[in-house]
Amino acid sequence: MVKPHRASPLAHLFTWLLTLQLCLPLSQAALPPTSPHPAHVPSLVPHSPTRLTRSRFSARTQLDFSTHCNASCFHRAEQWAQPEDLSQKLAFETLYSDGSRTLTAVDVDGDGEDEEEGRVRLSARAPPKRRLRRQVGSGRHRRVRRQIYGADGRFNIRGENFLLDYPFSTAVRISTGCTGVLVSQRHVLTAAHCVHDGKDYVKGARKLRVGFLTPPYINGTRPGRNQSDPRKPLVRWVRVKRTRVPKGWIQGPQEVSMDFDYALLELRWPHRRPFMRLAVTPSSDDLAGKRIHFSGFDSDRPGELVYRFCPVEDESNDLIYQHCDARPGASGSGVYGRVWDSTLERWERKVIGIFSGHQWLEIDGENRDYNVAVRFTPLKFAQICYWVHGNQLDCSHD
């Protein structure tokens, strides 16, 4: 069953809203977009990997990830639209289970035609950004990190019927304390800061594992046996074979940017659970209900899977700004929405971003705070898709 954290009249309202979200047929969630054009996905041409020195695994995991940004952040996409900058950001490191690592450089393939090259460069900006709305007031307010906005709108997910049901079954735990989402039978997408702090891999990345929730009475385990709380699910851990992190995140001495805060983990063994497909992040206007959803393992509710949904407040070229309630531990959750699938001609839940953390925005002297998710631009989608499939044939469209 789905339970709010506390019983109150407002919580009962949230329960009713959640039930409506889960029971509403996807085909009736909203009318299809007026112009459902699939995004153009460029091709990435990888070079031969270059062997690097072994990681020192000296970094500490930072679950409470927060950044500060000003107006200059919104001009970075224009700088990265240059081919040489794109290739540098889209290069990636691969960390293997034995501690070795490699660096793979990539080229953005424009098929040699000027028109095609122009579309590839424009795809980095995908879609045109809207100016973040100004907040009414003096702009002189105390900086309080508000990861919970107003009444807590999160729900604990319990019971076999929900924990093992799609889409909640796609959420997994990361042994460093974060959350991940299943995107194939062997791959988990999470936040880069859960495994790397921008300068080095975190200590826990040396023996990284992914945890699958199992109700306590599955596989012959009786409630209350070998666990302090019989209501909480068990966790089955699987070792990670290799980890991939984009070079856009690995900045060295520079300050890290949320724009590339994503990483892909490959499991040693395939799992048998349903996974969620990826999609290029559409404009919020093209999401059913203009809402996003994600489930994670928030630190203030240990052992619980926590679900939430909320409208998109605003968006830049690379980030989704929203006020979905979240706490540390939810980082790396797969942010999904109901996206129109032009092939199937219906609305489908697809992962369109990764929950990163909290960001302060300073625009025109005003400070505003948001919870932030990374957008999958066509180029980021092409990169992640290549990591999953190992080729570009399966990555020509979202």
Image: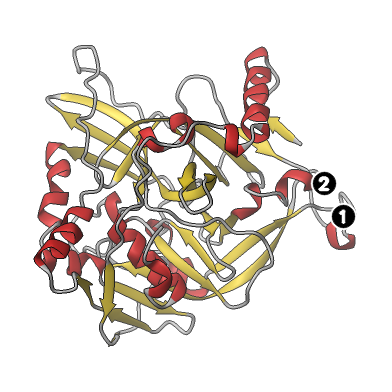
Tell me the kind of residue under disc 2. Answer: Pro
Q: Percent from the top left, x then y, of residue 283? A: 33, 39
Relative to 357, residue 124 above or below: below
Would you call the spot at circle 2 few (<14 residues within 10 Å), some (14-19), or many (20 or more)? some
Would you call the spot at circle 1 few (<14 residues within 10 Å), some (14-19), or many (20 or more)? few
Q: Percent from the top left, x then y, of residue 170? A: 61, 54
Relative to 115, residue 319 above or below: above
Front-most of residues 123 and 140: 123
Front-most of residues 348 and 48: 348
Does residue 58 appear anywhere in the picture? Answer: no
User: Viewed as shown, does residue 365 lie left or right of 164?
Assistant: left
Circle 1: element type: loop
Tell me the kind of residue under disc 1. Answer: Arg
Front-most of residues 133 and 60: 133
Mark linked to residue 225:
1
Mark linked to residue 109:
none
Q: CA distance from mark 2 to mark 1?
A: 7 Å
What residue is shown at x 48% (from left), y 29% (from top)? 289
Circle 2: element type: loop
Question: In which image quadrant can residue 154 be found?
Answer: top right
Q: Percent from the top left, x then y, of residue 127? A: 25, 44
Question: In which image quadrant can residue 315 be found?
Answer: top left
Relative to 396, residue 393 above or below: below
Q: Percent from the top left, x then y, of residue 391? A: 39, 77
Pointers 2 and 1 in contact (C-beta within 8 Å): yes
User: Viewed as shown, does residue 175 lie left or right of 5?
Assistant: left
Mark linked to residue 230:
2
The quarter of the image holding the N terminus is: top right
What residue is shown at x 21% (from left), y 72% (from top)? 109
What residue is shown at x 35% (from left), y 53% (from top)? 376
What residue is shown at x 19% (from left), y 12% (from top)? 138
The quarter of the image holding the C terminus is: bottom left
